[in-house]
Image (cartoon, grey):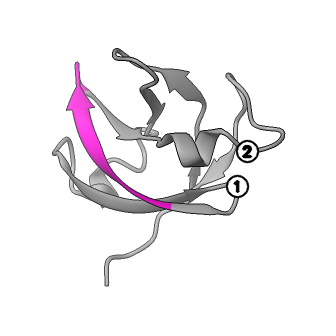
Amino acid sequence: MAEKHRFKSTIEPARGPGATVALVPADVVPALGGLKQKRAFGWVNGIDFMTATFPYKGTLYVGVPKAARWQPGLSWATRPSSS
């Protein structure tokens, strides 16, 4: 099993209808294997999900599915805890 890495980020709108992402902090990127696309498992405020990391313009992002976003108390620019 892969090692877990916890970080905080802001959920932001992305290109595409309903798409959202969270920026992976630069200090966590090397531990995740660098700027590479790969499958990832995570959680946002207690909601588990499977997603993917993806590099874009020198930074690494992780997709955040609707099920993790549409919960009470979570809105744009909220900084949820994630891993």
Q: Amino acid at mark 1?
A: Asn
Judged from the image, the secondary structure of the residue bearing numbered disc 2 is: loop
The picture places residue 13, in percent across and down from the top left corner, at 49, 19
Q: Is residue 30 visible?
A: yes
Place of residue 19 in the rendered image (x, y in percent of width and height, measured from the top left): 42, 26
Residue 50 magenta-highlighted: yes
**Local SS, label 1:** loop
**Marks 1 & 2, CB-CB < 8 Å contact:** yes
In the picture provided, is 69 more to the left or to the right than 58?
Answer: right
User: Residue 50: which quarter of the image?
Assistant: bottom left
Residue position for label 1 = 45
**Vertical arrangement, residue 67 with respect to residue 11, above or below:** below
Q: Residue furthest left?
A: 36
Q: Which residue is mark 2?
A: 71
Q: Is residue 83 visible?
A: no
Q: Main secondary structure of the magenta part?
A: strand
Q: Which residues are magenta?
A: 49-58
Residue 69 belongs to the span the image colors magenta: no
Residue that appears at 70% across and 36% down = 79
How many other residues sit within 10 Å of disc 1, few (<14), some (14-19) or many (≥20)? Answer: some
